[in-house]
Image (cartoon, helix red, strand yellow):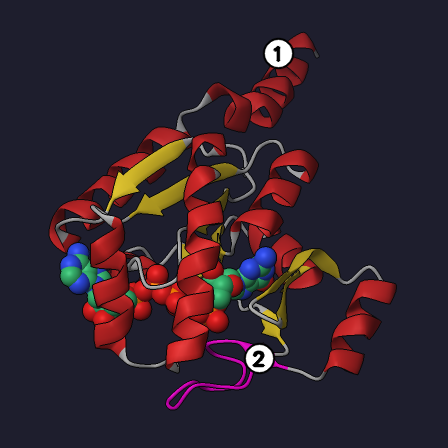
Amino acid sequence: MMNKPGMLVVYSGPSGVGKGTILGPFLNDHPNAVLSVSVTTRQPRPGEIDGVHYSFITKDEFQHLIDTDGLLEYAQYSGNYYGTPKAAVDKMRAQGKDVFLEIEVQGAMKIKKSCPEAVLVFILPPTYESLKERLLCRGTETKEIMEARLNTAKFELAQAKEYDYIIINDDVGRARKQLCAVVEAAKCETRYMLEYIEKLVNLTEK
Ligand SMILES: Nc1ncnc2c1ncn2[C@@H]1O[C@H](COP(=O)(O)OP(=O)(O)OP(=O)(O)O)[C@@H](O)[C@H]1O
Ligand SMILES: Nc1nc2c(ncn2[C@@H]2O[C@H](COP(=O)(O)O)[C@@H](O)[C@H]2O)c(=O)[nH]1
């Protein structure tokens, strides 16, 4: 079997929909899948560890990464900047790792254009009310920030149609199973296999 670069999976959904809740156990069960660690100018939440959940950097450091073409994509969200470090993603994919980017929709649309092989997965809430409840129960945001996030959610939900796969997070167990099924199906998609097919054809022609 020839060596195949890992998949790039863009994983989005409005704040509080349950992206982390679904993805955490998936990553534990799939050692070949890794989550890209983003850089952000946002302040850490209690319990968040620098270099694990995010690399927390200053605006100047973020600007330097933009200027030196160090980001695969970046966007502004709720007053802070978030970006995907390019070198780390390239390295992990070259090692055959499937790399997940848990990113918001503006960044996702940039990846869709620049990396057409990327598989885009969107997590929907069963209802808008349930999204509000989940954010409220999590209790990590002030009322003001929560309201801003819920407003952004309306714009984000409208972008779901641009994604390849949609998972409704009603029941966490079912959503986790669907994510496994989506990743398995995506591995067999023709667009993802093009490089492999080309190499194989070249070998048979020699
Ligand atoms: N299917 C579900 N039913 C009920 N509650 C859920 C469900 N999925 C997740 N939750 C809860 O919703 C809250 C938000 O989940 P989580 O932190 O995973 O969201 P997120 O999409 O990763 O948010 P963010 O983008 O802001 O980091 C958590 O308290 C979690 O326990
Ligand atoms: N475009 C990008 N969006 C990102 C990145 N890392 C995270 N995110 C998204 O930002 C919002 C807010 O995150 P939070 O941790 O403050 O709740 C959420 O939708 C994340 O998925 C990134 O590198 N690029």
**Viewport quadrant of the C terminus:** top right
Mark 2–mark 1 Cα distance, whole angstroms, equals 52 Å
Name the disc covering residue 204, or none: 1
- Residue segment shown in magenta: 42-56
> Which quarter of the frame holds ligand 1?
bottom left
| Image quarter of residue 174 | top left
What crowding class fits label 2: few (fewer than 14 Cα within 10 Å), some (14-19), or many (20 or more)?
some
Assess whether mark 1 and mark 2 are in contact (beta carbons under 8 angstroms). Answer: no
Examine the structure image and report whether residue 195 is included in the region drawn in magenta: no
Q: Residue furthest top?
A: 205
Tell me residue 157's x, y (percent). Answer: 41, 44
Q: Amino acid at mark 1?
A: Thr
Figure check: 54 above or below 97? below
**In the image, is 151 to the left or to the right of 64?**
left
Q: Which residue is tagged 2?
A: 42
| Image quarter of residue 55 | bottom right
Q: Magenta region, mostly helix, strand or loop?
A: loop
